[in-house]
Amino acid sequence: MFLLFQACGITLNVMSLFGLALGMGMLVDNATVVYENLTHKNLGPPGPAARERALAGTEEMVTPLIGATITNAIVFVPFLFLSKDIQDMFTDVAAAVGASLFASPGRFIDGGAPADGGDPLAGRAALAGGFNSMG
């Protein structure tokens, strides 16, 4: 993401940091949608069957999440048609949001497998415990 900033000549300033925060918020929203879908599916006891159900539940959310991500990115297209002064002010926000939204799927291109070869669902219990303690 920061390589894109460097290539485009974008510096870390209030507007680019706001864009990163906004993009990360959208990613957390997408993760919450997937988590709620998995919770709705009631994965049952841990084990190979639960892993398969979790992967199936996540796969059925791919199309809606791609649609939501593209919709969120398209919102920034009108910035290309603004006057030069306003465009300069908001380019950092649009680039940061776009970079954070489109950099996130890279994690799933390899099937979501961690680099160390561990179980991609290993953090599920910790994540569930964190969300359950909120409510």
Image: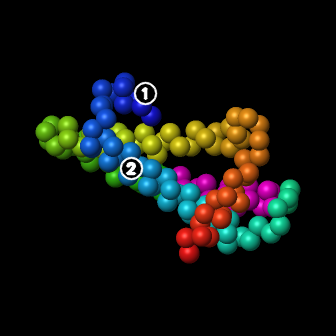
Residue 104 belongs to the span the image colors magenta: no
- The quarter in which the N terminus is drawn is top left
Q: Nearer the viewer, mark 1 or mark 2?
A: 2
Q: Is residue 61 magenta?
A: yes
How many other residues sit within 10 Å of disc 2, few (<14), some (14-19) or many (≥20)? some
The residue lying furthest to the right in this view is 48
The residue to which callout 2 is attached is: 21
* Residue 102 disc label: none
Residue nearest the observer in this picture, 6 or 127: 127
The x and y percentages for residue 86 are 16, 43
Please name the amino acid that badge 2 sits on: Ala
On screen, 20 above or below 35? above
**Place of residue 71 in the rendered image (x, y in percent of width and height, measured from the top left):** 42, 54
| Farthest bottom residue in view | 135
Q: Residue at x 42, y 31 (%)?
A: 2
Residue drawn at (35%, 39%), measured in percent from left and top?
Answer: 95
Quadrant position of residue 112: top right
Q: Is residue 68 left or right of residue 16?
A: right
Q: Secondary structure at mark 2?
A: helix
Query: Does residue 112 appear in the picture of this structure?
Result: yes
Mark 1 Cα shell of 10 Å, populated few (<14), some (14-19), many (≥20): few
The image quadrant that residue 11 belongs to is top left
Chain part drawn in magenta = 50-66
Along the viewing direction, whichever of 4 and 115 lies nearer the viewer: 115
Q: Which residue is mark 1?
A: 3
85 vs 95, left or right, is left
Q: Is residue 94 visible?
A: no
